[in-house]
């Protein structure tokens, strides 16, 4: 809040609707990732592969859309499904093999980042279908809300509730915690 107050005092355009919307859109991805990582950190683990998994999801989705002409919803679902499976590998290796999450997710960072690079030949995938571009650039409703922002707010809300319930379950039943008991 202090930073917002400083910027508001320095310029008369900071608190405009357009600027606030831009700030919220730019920070939506960080907010979504932060909610997931909060739960990871609460159980004393770490995930270094998040950014690379995002790149992999984007690469898979974009390639399915552009070159195989998949429907938008299916391409997004398969892109997300790919990284859910890779994330599950992280969890299983940490849990079953007892490899520290730092090491497991650092290895997955290399796998996912390299995989995304190979899939795209290190180049941006452009000229995606209009229906896909609408998610990030279109607007709905009288507030000119972008579909991506509305989706992130909805997903963040659900994820927040799940995180709070998960943490509450561990507080109520300490034996449910993966942390060593004192």
Image (tube, rainbow, N blue to C red):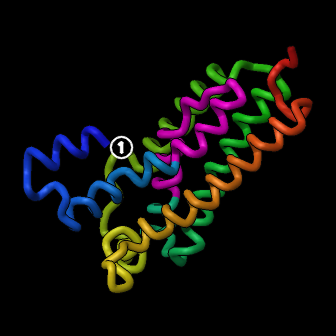
Residue 117: say if magenta. no
Which residue is more in the foreground, 147 or 167? 167
| Main secondary structure found in the magenta portion | helix
Indicate the quadrant containing the C terminus: top left, top right, bottom left or bottom right. top right
- Decide: is 142 above or below 170: below
Instruction: Say which of 178 and 105 sits in front.
Output: 178
The residue furthest left is 11
Which residue, given by chain and number where applicable, does mark 1 sit on?
122
Residue that extends furthest to the bottom in the rendered view of this protein: 142
**Quarter holding residue 79:** bottom right
**Relative to 162, 123 lies left or right:** left
Is residue 56 positioned above or below 111 on the image? Answer: below
Q: Which residues are magenta?
A: 33-60
Residue 70 relative to residue 129: left or right:
right
Q: Secondary structure at mark 1?
A: loop
Residue furthest to the top: 182
Q: Residues within 10 Å of mark 1 (few under 14, many from 20)?
A: few
Q: Residue at x 83, y 31 (%)?
A: 177
Q: Which of the image's four quarters has the N terminus?
A: top left
Instruction: Specify whether 85 is left or right of 125.
Output: right
Residue at horizontal 66 percent and vertical 43 percent from the top? 86
100 or 12, which lies in front?
A: 12
Q: Please provide percent x and percent y for residue 164.
A: 69, 47
Magenta stretch holds residue 46: yes
Residue 36, x across and y down, in percent: 60, 44
């Amino acid at each position: 809040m202090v930073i917002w107050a400083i910027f508001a005092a320095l310029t008369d355009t900071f608190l405009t609707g357009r600027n606030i919307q831009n700030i919220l859109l730019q920070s939506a991805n960080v907010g979504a990732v932060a909610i997931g990582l909060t739960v990871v950190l609460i159980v004393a683990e770490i995930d270094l592969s998040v950014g690379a998994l995002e790149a992999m999801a984007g690469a898979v989705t974009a390639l399915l859309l552009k070159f195989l002409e998949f429907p938008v919803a299916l391409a997004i679902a398969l892109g997300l499904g790919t990284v859910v499976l890779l994330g599950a590998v992280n969890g299983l290796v940490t849990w079953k093999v007892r490899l520290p999450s730092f090491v497991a997710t650092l290895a997955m960072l290399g796998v996912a980042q390299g995989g995304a690079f190979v899939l795209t030949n290190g180049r941006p995938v452009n000229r995606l279908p209009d229906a896909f571009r609408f998610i990030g650039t279109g607007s709905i409703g009288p507030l000119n809300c972008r579909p991506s922002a509305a989706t992130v707010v909805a997903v963040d809300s659900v994820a927040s509730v799940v995180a709070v319930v998960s943490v509450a379950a561990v507080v109520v039943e300490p034996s449910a915690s993966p942390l060593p008991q004192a």
